[in-house]
Image (cartoon, rainbow, N blue to C red):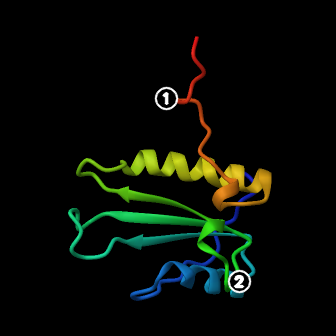
Amino acid sequence: MPGLEIGPVALVREGRVAAGDEVAEAMGAGLCLMLIGERPGLSVSDSLGAYLSFAPRVGLPDSARNCVSNIHGNGGLSHAAAADLLAYLVLRAREIGATGVALKDDRPGPGLLPPE
């Protein structure tokens, strides 16, 4: 995406969502996309969750993040659909300067179009 730079990738063993905020703040990142493998024991063991934070910092509340979850090829959100959604959310986050409850997936699509 124009105007975006992908910084260093940080791998955090057994990390939780907030670990991304700490790492991103230390790197001076404006956005953080944290990818987390879902917990063992769920119905699909290879599911992925993606958490997006604008202006990440230690102590950022969960309400300031967007979560795209259930990403997997066994009936969940496909990798391609998740990538499209995350790209949209990144662009909108940069436009409005926020993520979380302030950022919605308001792309036109089934169920979102106004009645004719």
Residue 80 visible from this viewpoint: yes
In this view, 88 is above or below 36: above
Residue 49, image x, y percentages = 42, 65
Q: Residues within 10 Å of mark 1 (few under 14, many from 20)?
A: few
Do the residues under discs 2 and 1 have CB atoms within 8 angstroms?
no
Q: Amino acid at mark 2?
A: Glu
In this view, 9 is above or below 114: below
Kindly identify the residue that appears in the image at 37 percent across and 64 percent down. 48
Q: Amino acid at mark 1?
A: Gly
Measure the alpha-carbon separation of dots 2 and 1: 37 Å
Kindly identify the residue that appears in the image at 63 percent across and 80 percent down. 21
Q: Earlier in the sequence, mark 2 or mark 1?
A: 2
Residue 1 visible from this viewpoint: no
Give the position of the C terminus as an image quadrant: top right
Residue 73, image x, y percentages = 27, 51
Q: Residues within 10 Å of mark 2 (few under 14, many from 20)?
A: some
Q: Quadrant of residue 70?
A: bottom left
Left or right? Give the position of 46 relative to 98.
left
Residue 14, image x, y percentages = 39, 87
Left or right? Give the position of 42 relative to 19.
left
Dot label at residue 25: 2
Q: Which residue is mark 1?
A: 111
In this view, 3 is above or below 108: below
Kindly identify the residue that appears in the image at 46 percent across and 87 percent down. 12
Between circles 2 and 1, the one closer to the viewer is 1
Tag 1's secondary structure? loop
